[in-house]
Amino acid sequence: TTYSHLITLVDVNGVIDTSFGNNGTVILDTMNSIDEIEQSYNYICLDDDNNIVYGISNDSTVTSSIKKFNSNGILDSTR
């Protein structure tokens, strides 16, 4: 079983940005167990070009991942 993380983009007023991903949300399959999720650290920020940078790390299994998404929610594979 793979467990998913969701990234939902909202504006400063809390309104979901439906132009991001699928109606405002991108689904990431990132963990293999509930224990990994409970022991993970998630990071999300915007870069200078307003692209979304998402990172996750897990101390117990030394799992880490960094993903960059364009403003429309598509994974940026150029970096």
Image: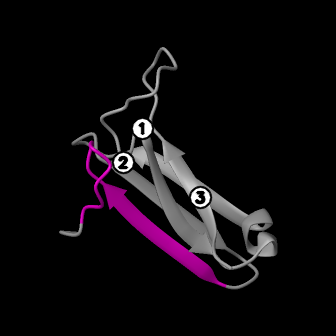
Q: Residue at x 25, y 42 (%)?
A: 48
Q: Residue at x 34, y 40 (%)?
A: 20
Kindly identify the amino acid type of the residue bearing the numbered disc 2: Ile
The residue that disc 1 covers is: 24
Q: Is residue 67 magenta?
A: yes
Work out whether residue 43 or residue 8 is closer to the camera in this orientation and state it: 8
Tag 1: Cα neighbours inside 10 Å, few (<14), some, or many (≥20)?
some
SS at badge 1: loop
Q: CA distance from mark 1 to mark 2?
A: 13 Å
Count of number-bearing discs: 3
* Colouring mode (rainbow / by chain / secondary structure / one colour): one colour
Kindly identify the amino acid type of the residue bearing the numbered disc 3: His
The residue that disc 2 covers is: 52
Q: CA distance from mark 2 to mark 3?
A: 15 Å
For residue 19, what is the image quadrant? Answer: top left
Q: Residue at x 79, y 64 (%)?
A: 38
Tag 2: Cα neighbours inside 10 Å, few (<14), some, or many (≥20)?
many
The residue that disc 3 covers is: 5
Write the start and end of the magenta stretch as one range.
Answer: 62-76
Tag 3: Cα neighbours inside 10 Å, few (<14), some, or many (≥20)?
some
> Of discs 2 and 3, which sits in the foreground?
3
Q: Position of residue 7 (x, y in %)?
A: 50, 48
Q: Residue at x 46, y 27 (%)?
A: 16
